[in-house]
Amino acid sequence: MNEERGSHLFSEAIRSLEDGNLDRAEALFIDVLDNLEKRHHHAILSLKSLVTISTDRGDFDTAIDWSLRLLDAQTGALGHTHADVSRTVMNIATMCETQGRPDIAREVKELHQYALSADRATKAQQVKTLRESRKTVEEETPAEADYDVTRLTLQELVAKSTHNFYEKIDTGKAPYVSMIFLGVLGIFFVMIFALKLCYSTEHNELLSSSQPRFSAADDRIKIQFVSPRIAEVTIDDKRKLKLPFSCYGYNAIEIADLLMLLPTENEYWLKRTPDGLIDRAGTEFFSETHTDREILALMASLQVSADSYYKRNKLYPDSLKQLGDFTYRNPYTKRMDYPLMQTVDIPGRLSPDKYLQTLKRGALWEDEPILYPGCVNICHLSRKTNSSVPESLVIQGCNKQGRFFHKSDGSPYVVICERGLPEKTLPLTMLDRTGRICLLDIHPAWARLVLLLIMCRHGIFFSLLGAAFFSLSGRFAGDTPKRVAIGISALLFGLGAVCLVVAWI
């Protein structure tokens, strides 16, 4: 037998059959049979093609002969119960009856039926033998108590314990299963609580060792870490608040301490930066030695001089020379610099108050000099009308990024001088309900996103636990543990949703 030659002849025969050359195709299919085993796939296909060719020619006797050979090959390759075998038997019977040879048709059907019955009997005996063998193995298998635990490896012992655990839960009742699940959940919380107990003030001590003081650009809020646990907050140099504070990073113990804080506790979050501190609203708190303090001090000095000038002359100056020499060394451009002053007519018939409000929100006046790091720009607002218009002077300064500073309430820090009087400010209430200061002492790439996730940590934590219990429900076969696990999962998802709402509020 030459399988390679038989496959090549089969391909040639198919091409001849497609070209309509039945004689050549028939000769090639016969050669295929001479080169391949009768159970080979190509041999069976060749026999089917020979049956088709003989039938198309009307030579039913030859077709019956080929069909009988096909039946023998299919039975050996596929078995008596295969659908192709049954189909070949019915084709042979049909051709025999058509040719007036019902005896051959009946004999083929009977032989096929007998083979089917014998095959079924053989399979039934095999199944019976298999069942008896399995029963014998189960009877000979030692009971659980007969195992010598000391001979088991650690991996086998863990697998056996896990199997027993799942089996007991699958057969347990709802109260029993609920107690086990709640016990597992309780152990998890105990582990987190144990980590919280390991939290120390070492991180806080590194920050408070020199009792640093940080203040906002307008000096309305000052924060000083006076001890490893207490931060003193001074508001408008009048009110003083002493609040507990904690530093947090990527340490697992610090994360556990975060999770054990109550979701209802009002927290004021600050992120430590190389320049100082910054809160979620973008308000920066600079250290006393920070370079930006030089620009802020210059702006405050300009305000004092401008108010003094107004009290003497009842108007603000149109030139910086009228206030004095305010030349300064720009800490960012490293060159001598000076504030730029302009007199700006309020455009159109806009209300001076409305125009002033736009500047307070950080807008630029017309033809304002370009902003750059460490610059200071001054605007003398005027309006040529017959009515009396309040004199105003606007002072704007930029930090090292060339952007405006922020006040304690998060708005742009713009110094407004009106009639020689300090700008009226509203009381700061943002820290009135604060119960704790939390300091993020790391520098993540997405700081705002990290702070948002930390604020929503309880909701995320309970949602992850709920997802874990929901996935655990698929590990059990019994309905009771599935329902209990899904119930606990729904409860945890509900707690997570409540915590997210509380964090949002």
Image (cartoon, rainbow, N blue to C red):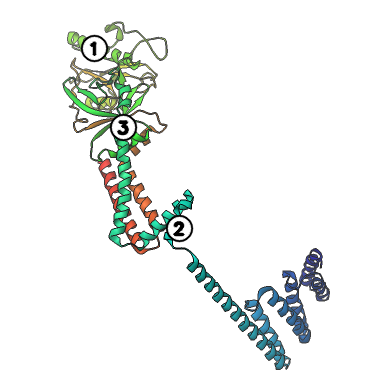
**Residue 222 figure quarter:** top left
Q: Earlier in the sequence, mark 1 or mark 2?
A: 2
Amino acid of disc 3? Tyr
Cα–Cα gap, marks 1 and 2: 95 Å
Q: Earlier in the sequence, mark 1 or mark 3?
A: 3
Cα–Cα gap, marks 1 and 3: 53 Å
Amino acid of disc 2? Tyr
- Above or below — where is 107 with respect to 49? below
Circle 3: element type:
loop
- Number of on-image labels: 3
The one of 447 and 248 positioned closer to us in this rendering: 248
Image coordinates for residue 147, horizontal then vertical, percent: 45, 58
Task: Identify the residue at horizontal 77%, vertical 72% (top origin).
Answer: 17
Task: Identify the residue at horizontal 73%, vertical 73% (top origin).
Answer: 44
Quarter placement of the N terminus: bottom right
Confirm or deny contact between disc 1 and disc 3 (CB under 8 A): no
Marks 1 and 2: which is nearer the front?
Answer: 2
Image coordinates for residue 297, horizontal then vertical, percent: 29, 13
Amino acid of disc 1? Ala
Give the labeled residue for mark 2: 147
**Residue 212 figure quarter:** top left
Residue 154 located left or right of residue 346: right
Can residue 365 be seen at all in this image of the molecule? Answer: no
Image coordinates for residue 257, horizontal then vertical, percent: 30, 36
Marks 2 and 3: which is nearer the front?
Answer: 2
Mark 2 is surrounded, within 10 Å at the Cα level, by few (under 14), some (14 to 19) or many (20 or more) other residues, namely few
Give the labeled residue for mark 1: 306
Image coordinates for residue 346, horizontal then vertical, percent: 27, 23
Q: Earlier in the sequence, mark 2 or mark 3?
A: 2
The label number, if any, that marks residue 199 in the structure image? 3
Confirm or deny contact between disc 1 and disc 2 (CB under 8 A): no
